[in-house]
Amino acid sequence: MPKVAFSDSYITIWRGKDCQSFLDGISSNLVANLKQKQVIQSAILDKNAKIIDFVSIMNLGGFLAVLGHRPNYKAMLDFITPRILQSDVNITDISELNDVIVSYEEYSDIEVGMCNTINDVTQARVSEKIILMVAAKKLEIECEKMSSEFHDWRIDNLIPWYGFEIKRGTIPYSCGLDLFVHDSKGCYTGQEILTRMRTRNKGLKILRRVPSSDANSDKFTTKGDQFSLVMLNQ
Amino acid sequence: MDCGTCETSAPLEMHKPEVVDVDLTISDNAVKMLGDAFGDDRSMALLVGVLSGGCSGYMYDLQIVETTDIDCQEVSIEGFRVLIPNSSSHLLNGIQIDYEDRLMGGGFKINNPNAQSSCGCGESFS
């Protein structure tokens, strides 16, 4: 089954009793209730609800593993570190010790939203069709480079990805991440803007698969040979 | 996953804001409400902190405590002990603690000259 390297990712370990509440306060999904062996994806937002990074958060018991997009790493740290204040949050970057792999269309016993670790490989099933694997580098797990085959698969399955639809400075509702905005969790950074967009039904966009011959090719977020992805107004 | 526990991976260097000596004031309404809350007991203190979160990025955190593990500076105003965490002192210098007696949205309010904006409910600022 296809496995591709998520080579432009970072993986950090968060320790401290305030980690979950801290992440809950700065991101769009409900992180506070994340239990051991669960994984959730959430967008870290600035006060204007613009994405700083879109992260996968795994509760591995005793610590959280937070996986995001390497180009957003510095912006993410610049955003969060002044906000830690007296909170008990300690972050360690373990990217150099691990490979991150995207496994898609693979059969797995792991339920959606759950993760497990066996022999230094943590698998987090973030959706029905995607498993994020974090494997110790020493294991040298074989996988392919992220190629057009993966992106064609994304196009067919309407899956937004880093650098294509998910870009720093976009709003979750305009890049296909509306599933990762919890609509009743309470206050978090950027929440007022998102709630206003939702209640007024303004600025909401939907990810569509269209023929690559479509006239709006300049608006394609992911361009494929036959079909492409585009964000259209709802 | 290699979590780095057995390696030498050091925690990331975190931004540590400069600690400032906080100057704060309390309105007459707030003094009256604190008097009602504390009674004659002056062993308790009002902890005025800041947490990350809220719509605008930072939220005020008011607690009545006897002691705290948080590294704080203590000021005495109108006979009340007020504790300010050093880690958020740069965000709280110059604040006025007020109390608004309203049916909706009433309670202690912080007027903060450091806040560039605040959310609609007034609970958070940036």
Image: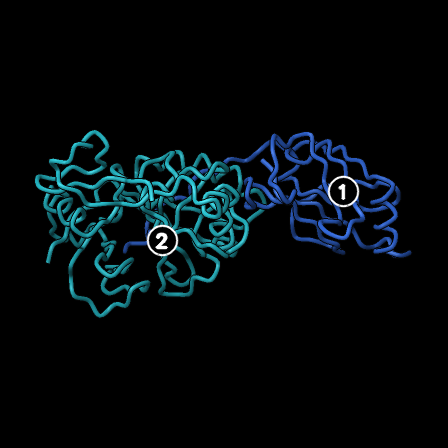
The front one of B2 and B85 is B85
Q: Colour of chain A?
A: cyan
Nearest to the observer: residue B55 or residue A137? B55
Q: Position of residue A142 (x, y in %)?
A: 11, 52
Q: Where is residue A231 drawn, in percent x and y?
A: 28, 40
Q: In this view, does B74 lie to the left or right of A10?
A: right
Q: Which of A97 and B61 is in front in this view?
A: B61
Circle 2: residue type: Leu
Q: Is residue B15 above or below residue A105?
A: above
Q: Disc 2 on helix, strand or loop?
A: helix
| The chain coloured blue in the image | B
Residue at 88% x, 51% y: name it: B35
| Residue that mark 2 sits on | A179
The answer for how far apart the CA atoms under marks 1 and 2 are is 45 Å
Give left or right: position of B6 versus A119: right
Q: Which of the chains bears the disc numbered 2? A: A
Please give the label number shown on residue B74.
1
Rendered-image quadrant of the C terminus of chain A:
top left
> Furthest-bottom residue in view?
A109
Residue A180, how many percent across, how many down?
Answer: 38, 52
- In percent of width and height, residue A217 lies at 18, 32
Q: Which of A185 and A140 is in front in this view?
A: A185
The kind of residue on which mark 1 rests is Glu
Q: In this view, does B23 lie above or below A160?
A: above
- SS at badge 1: strand
Are discs 1 and 2 both within one chain? no
Q: Residue at x 18, y 48 (%)?
A: A154
> Which disc, if any, is residue A63?
none
The numbered mark 1 sits on a residue in which chain? Answer: B
Q: Quadrant of the N terminus of chain A?
A: bottom left
Q: Is B54 placed left or right of B74 in the picture? A: left
